[in-house]
């Protein structure tokens, strides 16, 4: 007997007249007038990350709850004051909880097909969480390792090169670690240093806390640096005209669809990444093209930017970004690689935290680089918790040197672009934990677990910008941020 889902029940109640359906006249007008905002989030038809289908909305209110409680966005702007502009940080979590499947990722895989048909060289790069989640869409348990199958599927779909965004993460790590040491030693910018690889969190800070932007690391995100490295270093090594490359990021993250369109991330007048395809989109693409996922023979990454360290891989986990940065920061501060316990840094691992304004969300740790240099580390999940932390910072009540913030619970392994379960709750803590454990297992299996020891990272620096943190590296591998406070209309 087939299972009746909560969504089925809600549809039956609407059909029976127990719950109200929305009049057609409101459906027609809904696009940019944002009806029913007492039960759901307003989504602009121009939103680059998510799309909304009015006809499928069952008014369950789940999107509004997650956007308010976890992301601290809904309820923190007023359409009447700001000229009817919905504020959205593009995290996509409203899609993850949407019972009617009315909110989906804005699809981009058709653009990849069109680029292939136009004769472009298709290069696809895999974010960390992708390798432990795609098989869930084809009936395997959460956290099943499927890197080889995903690479094979992408080749079947027409990819000319398949690379690892964890290489880009290695670049982010070494630049961000060097920046932390400069802030600690020379006070080149204010402490604490916040991580900046999560575009939803960056946009949140730009909108609600622009005065605190100097605290954000200026190192570009892994996807931005992967795009940069492919269209410069990789293109040169492979003898490809960068203008003929169509760069695709395969990610857990709809916010990356917004991020790749930031003008700051252009490379020599071109977009660094040309498209972002989430795992949920990839599963749809595989089915649409008739690729038999179950019978694929595992394939391997292409050379050069398919080489990454274990530090780059744990970037997908809450706490993994901070742990990866600390590994290289220790080496840059002391001149020696870190001891074994740095490679299994328990205080920042796992979903549950040591202290929190909301249970389980904050993790705190102390790391001694030397007798006199002790680094206070804070790990934050969810922008609602980030709001609390930033308010403490404003009041001068915050004691920390390095703060990791990821918008999604669990970090990118909780990204809205990953597969979800068939019934409510769509993404359980058990699923998140399984993906987290799988990424740590990948790291433990790697011979190179320090980003600065990645031999291709060394080659990249030698052939492009020289030293880590050099003026040339700052010019190409770092970015700047802008205040979006005017969007609030206050
Ligand atoms: S994408 Fe995130 S910020 Fe935007 S409406 Fe959905 S939950 Fe809110
Ligand atoms: S935590 Fe990861 S998946 Fe979630 S919004 Fe940030 S970068 Fe995207």
Image (tube, rainbow, N blue to C red):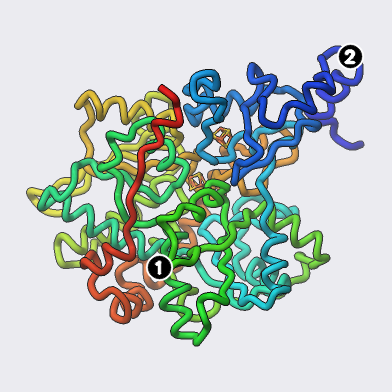
Residue 246 percent across, percent down from the top left: 59, 70
Q: Tell me, yes or no, if residue 65 can be seen here.
A: yes
**Residue at mark 1:** 309
Sequence-wise first label, 2 or 1? 2
Residue 322 percent across, percent down from the top left: 33, 50
Gap between marks 2 and 1, in whole Å? Answer: 57 Å
Above or below — where is 220 with respect to 9? below
> Which of these two is toward me, 294 or 173?
173
Give SS at disc 1: loop
Above or below — where is 406 with respect to 158? above
| Quarter-of-image position of residue 378 | top left
**Residue at mark 2:** 17
Number of residue marks: 2
User: Which image quadrant: the C terminus?
Assistant: top left
The residue located at (73%, 73%) in the rendering is 117
Q: Please name which of the two marks, 2 or 1, marks the residue nearer to the observer.
A: 2
């Amino acid at each position: 007997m087939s299972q009746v889902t909560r969504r089925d029940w809600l549809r039956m109640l609407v059909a029976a007249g127990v719950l109200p359906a929305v009049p057609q006249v409101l459906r027609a007008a809904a696009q940019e007038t944002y009806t029913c905002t007492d039960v759901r989030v307003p989504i602009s038809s121009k939103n680059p990350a998510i799309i909304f289908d009015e006809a499928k909305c069952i008014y369950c209110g789940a999107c509004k709850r997650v956007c308010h409680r976890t992301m601290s966005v809904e309820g923190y702007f007023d359409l009447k004051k700001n000229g009817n502009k919905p504020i959205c940080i593009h995290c996509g979590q409203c899609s993850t909880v949407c019972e009617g499947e009315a909110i989906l990722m804005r699809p981009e895989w058709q653009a990849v097909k069109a680029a292939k048909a136009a004769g472009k060289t298709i290069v696809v790069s895999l974010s960390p969480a992708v390798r432990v989640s795609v098989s869930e869409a084809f009936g395997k348990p959460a956290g099943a390792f499927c890197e080889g199958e995903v690479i094979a599927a992408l080749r079947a779909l027409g990819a000319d090169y398949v690379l690892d965004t964890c290489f880009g993460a290695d670049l982010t790590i070494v630049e961000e670690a060097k920046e932390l040491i400069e802030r600690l030693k020379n006070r080149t910018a204010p402490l604490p240093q916040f991580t900046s690889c999560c575009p939803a969190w960056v946009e949140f800070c730009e909108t609600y806390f622009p005065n605190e932007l100097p605290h954000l690391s200026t190192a570009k995100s892994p996807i931005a640096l992967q795009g940069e490295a492919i269209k410069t270093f990789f293109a040169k090594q492979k003898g490809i005209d960068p203008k003929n490359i169509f760069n695709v990021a395969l990610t857990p993250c709809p916010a990356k669809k917004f991020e790749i369109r930031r003008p700051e991330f252009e490379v020599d007048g071109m977009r660094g990444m040309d498209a972002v395809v989430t795992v949920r989109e990839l599963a749809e693409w595989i089915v649409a093209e008739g690729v038999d996922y179950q019978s694929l023979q595992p394939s391997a990454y292409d050379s050069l930017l398919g080489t990454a360290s274990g530090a780059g891989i744990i970037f997908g986990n809450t706490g993994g970004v901070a742990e990866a940065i600390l590994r290289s920061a220790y080496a840059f501060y002391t001149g020696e690689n870190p001891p074994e316990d740095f490679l299994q840094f328990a205080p920042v691992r796992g979903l549950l935290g040591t202290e929190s304004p909301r249970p389980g969300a904050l993790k705190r740790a102390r790391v001694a680089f030397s007798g006199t240099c002790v680094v206070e580390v804070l790990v934050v999940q969810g922008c609602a918790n980030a709001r609390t932390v930033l308010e403490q910072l404003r009041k001068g009540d915050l004691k920390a040197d390095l703060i990791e913030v990821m918008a999604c619970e669990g970090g990118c392994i909780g990204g809205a672009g990953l597969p979800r379960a068939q019934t409510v709750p769509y993404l359980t803590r058990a699923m998140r934990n399984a993906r987290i454990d799988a990424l740590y297992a990948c790291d433990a299996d790697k011979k190179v677990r320090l980003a600065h020891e990645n031999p291709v990272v060394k080659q990249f620096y030698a052939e492009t910008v020289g030293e880590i943190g050099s003026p040339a590296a700052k010019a190409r591998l770092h970015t700047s941020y802008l205040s979006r406070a005017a969007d609030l209309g206050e």
